[in-house]
Structures are given as structure tokens and as C-alpha cells.
Amino acid sequence: MNRAASILLVDDEVAIQRAVAPLLRSRGYDVEVAATGAEAVIAVVDRSPDLIVLDLGLPDLDGAEVCRRIRKQSKAPIVILSARGEEADKVEALDLGADDYVTKPFGPEELLARIRVALRRVFEAEAPEVEAVQVADFVIDFNRRRVVRGDEDIHLTPKEFELLALLARNADRVLTHHTMLKAIWGPNAVNQPEHLWVLIAQLRKKIEPDPSVPRYLISEPWVGYRFSTEPGSAAR
Amino acid sequence: MRSASDVRKLVLGIAGILVLALVFTQWTQASSPATVALSFLIVVLLVAATARLWVAVTTSLAAMLAFNFFFLPPVGTFTIADPQNWIALFAFLAVSLVASNLSAVARARAQEAVARRDELGRLFDLSRDVLLITDSQEASSRLAGFISRRFDLDYAAICVPGASEWIVHASGPQELVLDQRELSTGFASIDGANPAAGLRSDAVHRMLTVGANVVHLVPLRLGTKPIGLLAAGGRAVEPGTLDAVAGLAAIAIERAQFLDERKAAELARQSEELKSALLASIGHDLRTPLTAIRVAAGNLQATWPSEQERREQSDVILSEVERLTRLFQNILEMARIDAGAVTQDMRWVAPSEIVEAARGRVEHALRGYAIDLAVEPERLVRLDPRLTSAALSHLLENAAQYAPAGSTIDVRAIVQDDGLTIAVRDRGPGISPSDLPHVFERFYRGGVAQRRRSGTGMGLAIARGVLAAEHGRISAENCSDGGARFTMVVPAEVK
């Protein structure tokens, strides 16, 4: 991270702008503010920010539409600010290419953590394709299709490995049920989440030290799952 | 029971017998006893056909005596020589008695049929009346009124067991006081007597003597469950009819209760809808300030902000707390309006004071707007200044929400002889015609384009509610040269 990352903050509420923008600046980010969806799309084109923090309830466009328009212009990660009760909008936005979300009301650290993770992925993506993911003593070797915990070789079925690899390649990023179903079972399966539940349960039994308190495969209620590389993120 | 007409018929009948006897003895010498007996029988039947049984029987006895005295030898005495004539005499008596009886029975049947028809008619009228009862509060008393009127009763009452004593809804010209204990025993006796067990329904009727009056107590049942008593006094009404009346009354009470329950269910549904609308509305308006406060407070705790940045962050917190306060004030005001807890506190006040008070209430929202105020003429009005300024403050806040920053909001207060009119006019986009009929509905926020204007959708509804408590009214219109105008009218005394 040689240069300061630039962040576009999109929220029509002046109070949020006034509280969040200085917070981000204090961490060395370069912050731009937009109050409407249209302004946001223009700012994405003009400034090509490294990351976009997007409020779902904008006065001119609905959140999913803004996501779609931003994605046409930029691959920068989008972190959504959403309200409880807007689950459907949130999932739609994630399916349309948003990367993560924070639920209002959120605290400063929560938002900063999401932004850090999303930005890290951007800079890592510039590095060559990863061949393995390692979290503590847990290793996933993509090329050799091996999963090891400590000294123990964990045997996974092809589908289990596929799902784990999908989640691990997008480590710390929430994947929606829709995305996972489509990637593993194909477009016809997107309305059959039970496939996913069963497979996740099997995976947890095999890889989690304690399947009842998942440490790696974290459920994001109503939205999807994420593969967590951060210890203690289960408490979220 | 012996009415004057019965006596007159008896006299006529006996006179008829005597006249016939005279005719037969004086002018027709050759008449046989059989002819005479048949002629007498005609008189007896005529009497029986028109009068009561006892008149017919008396006439029969008189005819028999006259037959014996004038026509059976020895003539002129009540003795009879020939035993055959005894048979003739008793045969005559038997025929006339049987005929009288048959006729009387037929007549009674006819009378009963008429009475039945009459009561059926009354029952039908009553059933129509019952359908008019829609309010369970007054169902019982209206029911008693209908029963006493339709059945010409001097006294009719619906008695329902209350918490500690009987609730008696009485009607009719006569006023009686029913003994509570009698009602209780009457009610208790129904429980044991189940009509389904084959007991005659009128077996559970009780007669109650109140002063000189006899009152029938008839159970009111819903299905088999007794719910009260019907008391009827005055004109005698068939027990079966009373049962039918009681049945109708019970149905009417049940129906009124049912209507009430439906109304309550409807109200509950509306309040449910209101609650979810409220939740949806305040959900957003609560979360944004909370988020801003949480982030700003976190910033204040951190070490990075400069003095100026700290002031900025605490300013964010204060203004968002202000916003939350306003939101809760609105919710409370709405709840008070809903509960009908808005009371007027009248006093003499100058209109400009009301405007000042209203501006003070929403000072934060009016920042950045110019207010052009005109009051004419400045006369004292007598109204509730608190309510009036509250309503005006919501109009001002609404204007500020929709008008562009820096624009002017016109406030015109006009005192007329019958009250105060205040118009608030903004330089905003105006109200779209499709929104115009709904602007005072709660949680209604005009147009999709404006869905995120900060506001709760409660202000105008509260203004209308507050004004309604003052017997005032409010209206909205678009000005020909742009912007919206809200006009509130408060009736008031004017000095």
C-alpha cells in the first residue's frame, strides 16, 4: 500500500457524512463524498476510487441500481451501509457485485474493519493468483486439492472442496446463497438453498474444530456465508 | 269474564225460546213436539255460534224447561207423564249441549287462530326491529322498547346478570322494580331445566308478582347457555310467543355483541397496520441519527481529532439528538391525539405570539430560511395557544423540509370575527396533484423522488389532529406561481 487508498462515501444524510468522512480521513484514506446515486456514478467515473461505501437508501436511485451502474464502470469493492429490514435489498446488491455490508447503526471500528478487509483483497488481487490459503494450522492447497489441519489430512468430496475453495478464494468476503448455489450447482439450483445448508453442515463437521461454534465458515444470517481468516470473527 | 254482550246474548236467546213457545202454543195448535224441539235447537245453535259456552248451556237448559212446560203433557207443569217424553226431553238436552260445545270449540279455535296470526305479525315486526340494533351498548334497552311497543306490554325488560347485581333495561308505560333475589332464583332455575331434555319450555317460565302486576320471567338463551331473563308484564301473552320473543331477544343481543367484536377486530387490524407503518417509518429515522451519534461519539473518544474536529463531531451528536427528540415528540403527540387526550386550554393571546412560539419550536429546521411574517389586524384571540402553535410549527417544519435552502417562507395570520386563519406558503416544488388528497394522512410522504426528505410523515397528520381538537381545520393547495400553501383555520373569540 504505497499510496493512500481513496474512498467514495455515498450517503445523503449530512450527519453520516459529517461523522464518517473525518473518521476515514483520520485513517489516512482519501475521502470523496456523494449525496445521490447519480453523483456517485459520476464520481466513480471521474475519480476511480479504490473503494466505495454506499448507503442503500438514496433519494434518487435504489441501492441495487446504484450497484449495477457502479459495477459497469469500476471493479472497486463496494461496502454497503444498510438497515436491518432491508435484507432483500442487501442481498440483491451483493448479488450485483457489492462486496460486503455493515448494518446500521454501526460503530466506527466495524466499518473500518470491513474497509480494511475489502481493500486488502484489492491489493492482494494485484499479486499473482494464490495457490494456497493458510489460517493458523489450517491449510487449503488449491492446486493439489488438499486440505490439512495440523498433521491431519482432511478428506473432502469434490463438491465440498469446490464450495470451500470458492469461499476461501473470496476469504473474508460475504458470498450470497445465490452466488454459491449458482457456482456449485448451476443456475437451476439457485432456489434450492437446502443443498447449500447440507453441504455447509458437512464441511463444518470435517474442518471446524467445533462445528457448533464455526470458526472458518461464518454464517451471515439471511445473506450468505463467508470464509473467515480473522480469529474471533464468529462473535460478530 | 261475563261480559255485557254475553248477558245480552243470553237474554236474547231466552227471549227467542219464549217467543217461539208463545207462537207455537197460541197460533199453531197442531204443532208436534218434534217440530218445537227442532225450532228450539235452532235458537240454541244460534246462541252457541255467537256466544260463550256458558251462555249456550244456559240457553239449552231454558229451552229444555220451556219444551217440558209448554209442550210435553201434562202441559203447564214441569212433570212428565209419558216415559217416552223423558227420553225426548233428554235427547233434546243432549243434542243442544253437544252442539253448543262443538260450536264453542270451533269459535275458540278461530279466535286462537286470529290471536296467533296477530302475535306472529308482532313477532315479525319485532324481528325487523331487531335487525336495526347495531350498537351493543344500547341493544338491551332498545330491545326492551321494541318488545313493549310491538306487544303492547305495560312493562318489558331485558335483565342481564352483572358483576354484583342484575342490570335491568326496562321499557313500557309502567315502572316496576324487580326483586334482585327473585331474578337470581329465576335465573338459577333455568340452568337445571334443559329444554333439550324434553321439558316444555314454558315450564321454566316464572311468574312474579310486583305490586298489583304479574310479570313473566322468560329465560334468554344462546344455544343452551342462559344469558339473562326477559320480563314481561301487562297484557297476557302466550307462553310460546314469549319464548319466541325471548329467542329473538337473545339473537339480537348476540348479534349486537358480534357486531361489536367485529368492530373491535377491525380497530385492532387498523392499529396493527398503523404500528407497522410507524415501525417502518421510524425504523429509518431512528437508525440514521443513531449511526451518526455512534460514529461521532467513537470519533470523540479517539485521539486523532483536532479541537475543531471535536467541536464538529459533538455538533453532529447534538443535532442528531435534537432530531431524535423531535421524532419522539411527534410519536408522543400522535399517541395523545389517538388517545383523545388533547385538551384545550383557552386564553387570550396575540397572533404574533403564536407564530413566535411556533418558530421557536422548530428553530433548528428553519435555520437557513427567511420568514416573511404579516399579522393583520393584530387583535387578541381566545384559543389554546399551545395547540395552535404546535400545529403551526409542523406546517413551518414541513415548508422548510420541501423548500430549497435560503428561500423565503411566507406566514400570513389574519384575524377575522370568527377566528384566526394562518397561511404558510413555501417556494418548494409544490404538491403533486396525486399527493394532494393524502398529504394529511399519517406516514404519507409525497412522491418517490422525495422519499428520503428527512421527516417522519407525521407532522401534517399531527397538525390536522391538533387542529381537530381545537375544532379547526387545515387545507393544502398549490399556488399559481409555484410552491405549496397550507392554511389553518382556528375558530376563536376575537377582541
Image (tube, helix red, strand yellow):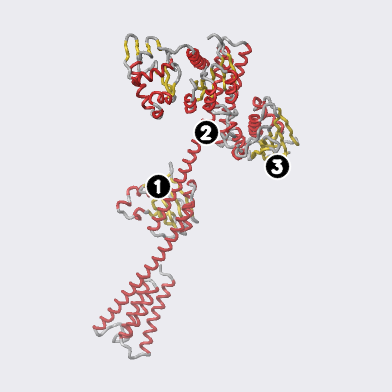
- Is residue B486 something that shows in the picture? yes
As shown in the figure, which amino acid type bears the numbered disc 3? Asp
As shown in the figure, which amino acid type bears the numbered disc 2? Ala
Residue A21 image point, x, y percent: 58, 17
Name the mark on residue B227: 1
> Residues at badges 2 and 1 in contact (C-beta under 8 Å)?
no
- Is residue B290 something that shows in the picture? no
Between B259 and B117, the one lying in front of the other is B259
Residue ID at (49%, 49%): B134
| Residue at mark 1: chain | B
Viewer-nearest of discs 3 and 2: 2
| Residue at mark 2: chain | B
Mark nearer the N terminus (1 vs 3): 1
Residue ID at (31%, 74%): B98
Compared to residue B250, the image places residue B348 above or below, namely above
| Quadrant in which residue B418 is drawn | top right
Viewer-nearest of discs 1 and 3: 3
How packed mark 1 is, by other alpha carbons closer than 10 Å (few <14, some 14-19, many 20 or more), is some
Q: Secondary structure at mark 2?
A: helix
Image-based side of A119 in relation to B42, left or right = right
Q: Which residue is mark 2?
A: B277
Compared to residue B77, the image places residue B311 above or below, namely above
Q: Secondary structure at mark 3?
A: loop
Q: Which residue is mark 3?
A: B418
Q: Residue furthest left?
A: B83
Name the mark on residue B107: none
Between B145 and B25, the one lying in front of the other is B145
